[in-house]
Amino acid sequence: MIIQSVNDLIGKTPLMQISGYALPEGTRIVAKLEMFNPGGSIKDRLGVKLIETGFLEGTINKDTTIIEPTAGNTGIGIGMAALKYGLKMIFVVPEKFSQEKQMLMRVLGAEVVNTPTAEGIKGAVQKAKALSASSEHTYLPLQFENPLNPQTYYETLGPEIVKDLDGEQITAFVAGAGSGGTFSGVSRYLKEKWPEVRTVVVEPEGSIIAGGPPGPHDTEGIGMESIPEFMSDQSYDAVHTITDQEAFYYTRELARRNGLFVGSSSGAAFAAAVKEAQQLPPGSLIVTVFPDGSERYLSQDIYKER
Ligand code: PMP
């Protein structure tokens, strides 16, 4: 088969059993490997959905400038999806986020505007809104508010997981939350199918889902400074708050033991999946998501012992 566009390579990522860890008898942890998307992350799915829906609904035309606050992966996803239309793009990125992701956005033709790390993602959102207000023909997808974000994962990732497992019932779904789009969309899909499925949110220390004030963390791509509406509407059964040390430990171990080069949000998801495995009955089937790969974090020394 000959592929005509990278967009044809989005989704249908592998679901892999993660072996080599001490788990209760018969318990399995399986992970969707989202770094196999062409832009290298789970957010390719969102990028194509935002751009195609924008054209369908008329919020985007060929003269539109797309402006979006992003930690990087959503920008890369939007950038790839917008290529065939030649759209102008401005991505607003807090300066601490990986240089590799910023480089990939730029090579796709985007302008990257940095905001101070201390202002967090909120600072990036404010800056994006201000840029949009001062220019013409702009469209702000605003992944942190846009219902298309959870909808994307409800329509793609949820059904893929069920199909990959040939309908075998899942005990628990464990996923990190940055915007919460992935978690909300897949949880809603799974709960509609199996109301008793346990859904578990993963956040880094310094994220506010389990309570407490916002604070800094090195685990990249997850963590909330405020709760988006679609996340507060979505029920969940537990929250695991994972330290940077735990997240980066499992990020290293997934490379060493399994040959999986994943980002730190994957390490955090796996740390939480292991905690779940230890609490659930033997024979449980735990599904998690590895959102991206480690190679976009090498300049941050992702494999350094912490
Ligand atoms: N991990 C990484 C590496 C990400 O880039 C993101 C998206 N920012 C997430 C996890 C979280 O995904 P979501 O925004 O759907 O909660």
Image (tube, rainbow, N blue to C red):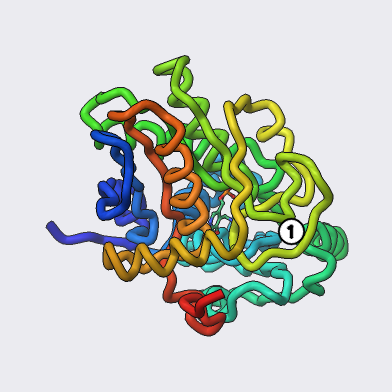
Spot the residue most to the bottom: 299
Residue drawn 26% across and 49% down?
A: 16
The quarter of the picture where the C terminus appears is bottom right
- Viewer can see residue 260: yes
> How far across and down, in percent of the image, does residue 262 sit?
41, 64
Residue drawn 74% across and 58% down?
A: 137
Left or right of residue 49, residue 128 in this image: right
Q: Nearer the viewer, residue 126 or 280?
A: 280
Can you say whether 153 is above or below 297 in the image?
Answer: above
> How far across and down, in percent of the image, does residue 207 sit?
72, 51
Residue drawn 54% across and 35% down?
A: 200
- Viewer can see residue 135: no
Q: Nearer the viewer, residue 251 or 139?
A: 251
Can you say whether 306 is above or below 291 in the image?
Answer: below
For mark 1, does the 10 Å Cα neighbourhood hold few (<14), some (14 to 19), or many (20 or more) residues?
Answer: some
Residue drawn 38% across and 61% down?
A: 35
> How far across and down, in percent of the image, does residue 64 sit?
66, 60
Q: Nearer the viewer, residue 209 or 143?
A: 209
Can you say whether 170 is above or below 27 in the image?
Answer: above
Q: Which residue is mark 1?
A: 137
The quarter of the picture where the N terminus appears is bottom left
Spot the residue most to the left: 1
Left or right of residue 66, residue 117 in this image: right
Can you say whether 203 is above or below 159 in the image?
Answer: below
> How far across and down, in percent of the image, does residue 248 sit?
51, 66
Q: Does the residue tagged 1 have its C-beta within 8 Å of any atom of ligand 1?
A: no
- Callout 1: SS: loop
